[in-house]
């Protein structure tokens, strides 16, 4: 029999009205235009067309995002050079996460559009998420709490140090 645990707090997220729904620039673009340092913004790598940044709302320690500089909503909006750079950087990000965290597995993926889970649907980004057996537990459903064993600054430093040359 299928058991369900309801996370009612997600209703606000699913039905919520977001600033990027109305044409303003994405949080990624705002961050890039802020003039803040890579250390302050948790950017761990920059390449010609994309950058890698720690997720501010990680599923697990080491959760990395690879984001094009150009704000586009879909893979089909990238040109050939951006597409190549995106996947080259995702591949390097996977290597860095493996070297820094030794996860038992990884999730790599994109959420294209809000119904697919995209929290910032106007600005394409790829997730690189280290995973371990049993890393998901009841805390997020029962207590609206996520337990992470490491601060974001420490995660960013580990990924930077492990980034392939």
Image (tube, rainbow, N blue to C red):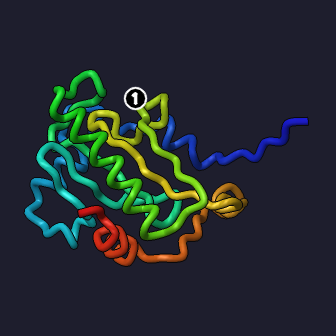
For residue 91, side relative to residue 139 (left or right): left
- Residue 106 location (% of width, % of height): 53, 52
- Residue 8 location (% of width, % of height): 64, 46
Q: Residue at x 58, y 65 (%)?
A: 146
Closer to the camera in the image, 106 or 13: 106
Q: Residue at x 60, y 65 (%)?
A: 145
Q: Residue at x 43, y 70 (%)?
A: 100
Q: Quadrant of the C terminus?
A: bottom left
Q: Residue at x 38, y 37 (%)?
A: 17
37 over 125 or under it: above or below: below
Q: How many numbered circles does the render carry?
A: 1
114 over 150 or under it: above or below: above
Q: Residue furthest top?
A: 76
Secondary element at image label 1:
loop
Closer to the camera in the image, 41 or 25: 41
- Residue 108 location (% of width, % of height): 46, 44
Q: Residue furthest front?
A: 165
How busy is the neighbourhood of tag 1: few (under 14 within 10 Å), some, or many (20 plus)?
A: some
Q: Quadrant of the N terminus?
A: top right
- Residue 42 location (% of width, % of height): 27, 66
Residue marked by disc 1: 113
135 over 116 or under it: above or below: below
């Amino acid at each position: 029999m299928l058991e369900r645990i309801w996370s009612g707090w997600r209703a606000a997220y699913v039905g919520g009205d977001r600033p990027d729904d109305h044409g303003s620039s994405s949080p990624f673009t705002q961050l890039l235009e802020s003039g803040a340092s890579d250390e302050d913004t948790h950017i761990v790598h920059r390449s010609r067309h994309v950058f890698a940044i720690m997720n501010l709302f990680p599923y697990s320690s080491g959760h990395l995002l690879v984001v094009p500089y150009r704000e586009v909503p879909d893979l089909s909006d990238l040109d050939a050079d951006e597409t190549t750079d995106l996947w080259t950087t995702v591949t390097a990000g996977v290597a860095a996460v493996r070297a820094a965290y030794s996860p038992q597995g990884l999730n790599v993926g994109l959420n294209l559009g809000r119904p697919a889970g995209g929290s910032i649907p106007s600005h394409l980004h790829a997730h690189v998420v280290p995973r371990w057996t049993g890393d998901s537990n009841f805390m997020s459903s029962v207590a609206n709490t996520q337990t992470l064993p490491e601060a974001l600054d420490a995660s960013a430093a580990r990924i930077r140090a492990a980034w392939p040359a």
